[in-house]
Image: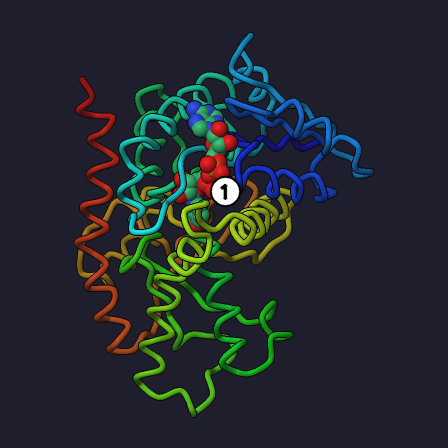
């Protein structure tokens, strides 16, 4: 029996994500929470002929508590998305408070659930959840994840496009490390499971890196003010949730990049910190998953000089984003 919960389930990401989770045969119960429209979304999804029993709640009558009761995995896409010209950090003012309040609810009702944070800016919202959990005395760094899977999904697609065969995109694996915003997104294309064709020269390699880092902007611009990536994000979020659930079921060898606290694996973290040459409290690297969540944080491994330069550029930005998230809770008046 697995209960999955989506907080922000009526939104652009929330609805297709809930649909994909409803289609996942590993899930037997699906709890949907939002400040609007969840009863309708739940009624609609409940007619789909898959095992999960669906319930939708609003804030009234302890809706958050009811949604979270018995949750094994909680995915959070609640909050506002970007409009053209905005960075993910511009969202902090609104989303930080939303994520804090939802995390407070999770700490009270489902403290042992795996928590997957989608709400931006992920580099700061994950530390917010961690600090709320620490205050409540329920923090387990192995169970908290920032969802960076969309960067990984984009990398697979764009590399397959370069190779000229989109049918490969499901098999192409590119580790994307660092964080989840602009320059903190560092695709390690030199470690791609499928090498880029020789025709990709330095300039087009740089352009590809830039496209992966700022791929979200393509969608924000194309939607012309109507939001950011929702459908591709829902796909990515469901993929990552499915990996967690498979690992919980005992499947071994599941590895995925995710933005986690380095406290989740002090041994792996020490090796990573040495590679980075900087102390960071959170970082996205390849994570080995197991029944308890993070088993191992993998090191970066062999990277090119150009990738080293990208990592160097990401570090100060990440440090800033992490501090912003941590102090939002620790220095709250
Ligand atoms: P949206 O505006 O379509 O949906 C957000 C939903 O959250 C709305 O239904 C809203 O009612 C709900 N919500 C607001 N306050 C809430 C609260 N206190 N409790 C519960 N629900 C609440 O936005 P969209 O496009 O679904 O994006 C959601 C978030 O995901 C944004 O922060 C966006 O930046 C982020 N995002 C993250 C990505 C990633 O790769 N991690 C990729 C794309 C978006």
Residue labelled with disc 1: 293
Residue 255 vs residue 80, the one in the foreground: 80
- The front one of 243 and 210 is 210
Q: Quadrant of ligand 1?
A: top left
* The one of 187 and 15 positioned closer to us in this rendering: 15
Q: How does the figure colour the protein chain or chains? A: rainbow
In the displayed structure, 26 sits above or below 8; it is below
Residue 239, image x, y percentages:
58, 51
On the image, the x and y values in percent for residue 321 come to 23, 44
Category of crowding for the residue at label 1, using alpha-carbon neighbours closer than 10 angstroms: few (below 14), some (14–19), many (at least 20): many
In the picture, which quadrant includes the N terminus?
top right
Rendering coords of residue 71 (x, y %): 58, 26
Q: Where is 297 relative to 131, above or below?
A: below
Query: Picture quarter containing residue 189?
Result: bottom left
In the rendered image, the residue lying farthest to the bottom is 198
Q: Quadrant of residue 299?
A: bottom left
> How many discs appear?
1
């Amino acid at each position: 029996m697995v209960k999955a919960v989506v907080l922000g389930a009526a939104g652009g990401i929330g609805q297709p994500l809930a649909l994909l989770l409803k289609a996942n045969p590993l899930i037997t119960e699906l709890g949907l929470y939002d400040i609007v429209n969840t009863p309708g979304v739940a009624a609609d999804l409940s007619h789909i002929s898959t095992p999960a029993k669906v319930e939708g709640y609003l804030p009234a009558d302890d809706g958050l508590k009811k949604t979270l009761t018995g949750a094994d995995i909680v995915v959070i896409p609640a909050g506002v998305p970007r409009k053209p010209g905005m960075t993910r950090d511009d969202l902090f003012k609104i989303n930080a408070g939303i994520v804090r309040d939802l995390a407070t609810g999770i700490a009270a009702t489902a403290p042992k659930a795996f928590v997957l944070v989608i709400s931006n800016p992920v580099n700061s919202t994950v530390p917010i959840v961690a600090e709320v959990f620490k205050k409540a005395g329920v923090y387990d760094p192995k169970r908290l994840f920032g969802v960076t899977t969309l960067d990984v999904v984009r990398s697979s697609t764009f590399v397959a496009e370069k190779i000229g065969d989109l049918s490969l995109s499901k098999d192409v694996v590119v580790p994307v490390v660092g964080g989840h915003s602009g320059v903190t997104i560092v695709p390690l294309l030199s470690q791609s499971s499928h090498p880029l064709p020789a025709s990709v020269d330095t300039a087009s390699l740089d352009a590809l890196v830039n496209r992966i880092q700022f791929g979200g902007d393509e969608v924000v611009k194309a939607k012309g003010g109507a939001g950011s990536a929702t459908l591709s994000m829902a796909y990515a979020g469901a993929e990552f949730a499915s990996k967690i659930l498979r690992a919980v079921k005992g499947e071994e060898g599941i590895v995925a990049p995710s933005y986690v606290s380095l406290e989740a694996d002090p041994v792996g973290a020490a090796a990573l910190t040495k590679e980075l040459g900087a102390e960071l409290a959170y970082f996205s690297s390849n994570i080995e998953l197991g029944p308890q969540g993070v088993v191992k944080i993998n090191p970066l491994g062999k990277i090119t000089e150009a990738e080293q330069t990208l990592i160097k550029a990401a570090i100060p930005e990440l440090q800033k984003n992490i501090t912003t998230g941590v102090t939002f809770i620790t220095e709250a008046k």
